[in-house]
């Protein structure tokens, strides 16, 4: 999993994506992941934190 800041069509985005090793030392991204604008990521993170509090995670 890699999390990177990128620019997509002129917009800042944060891309959290699963990568695989295509050959020794060469990593490539898969389609598995999320690419969202920073504000949307903040909403997702807030929701995840609230959920973790509800289930009693530390």
Image (spheres, grey):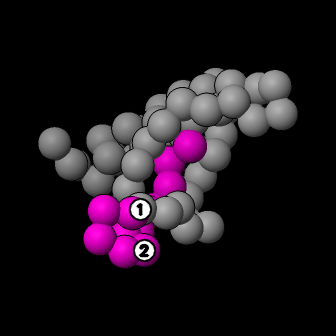
Specify the quadrant that holds the N terminus: bottom left
* Dot 2 or dot 1, earlier in sequence: 2
Looking at the image, which residue is at 22% across and 49% down?
Answer: 56
At numbered mark 1, what does the secondary structure look like: helix, strand or loop?
Answer: strand
User: Does 35 lie within the magenta span?
Assistant: no
Decide if residue 57 is on the left or right side of residue 44: left
**Residue 43 visible (yes or no):** no
Decide if residue 42 is on the left or right side of residue 55: right
Report the magenta residues as a range. 15-26
Q: Position of residue 46 (x, y in %)?
A: 48, 32
Decide if residue 18 is on the left or right side of residue 55: right
Magenta residues, dominant SS class: strand
Q: Position of residue 28 (x, y in %)?
A: 49, 63
Q: Position of residue 57 (x, y in %)?
A: 21, 48
Q: Position of residue 13 (x, y in %)?
A: 65, 32
Residue beneath disc 1: 27
Looking at the image, which residue is at 69% across and 30% down?
Answer: 7
User: Does 18 lie within the magenta span?
Assistant: yes
Q: CA distance from mark 2 to mark 1?
A: 6 Å
**Residue that extends furthest to the bottom in the rendered view of this protein:** 23
Quarter residue 8 falls in: top right
Residue beneath disc 2: 22
At numbered mark 2, what does the secondary structure look like: helix, strand or loop?
Answer: strand
Q: Residues within 10 Å of mark 1 (few under 14, many from 20)?
A: few
């Amino acid at each position: 999993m890699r999390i990177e800041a990128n620019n997509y069509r002129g917009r800042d985005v944060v891309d959290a994506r699963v990568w695989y090793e295509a050959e020794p030392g060469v990593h490539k991204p898969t389609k598995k992941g999320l690419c969202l604008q920073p504000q949307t990521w903040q909403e997702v993170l807030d929701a995840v934190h609230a959920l973790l509090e509800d289930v009693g995670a530390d």
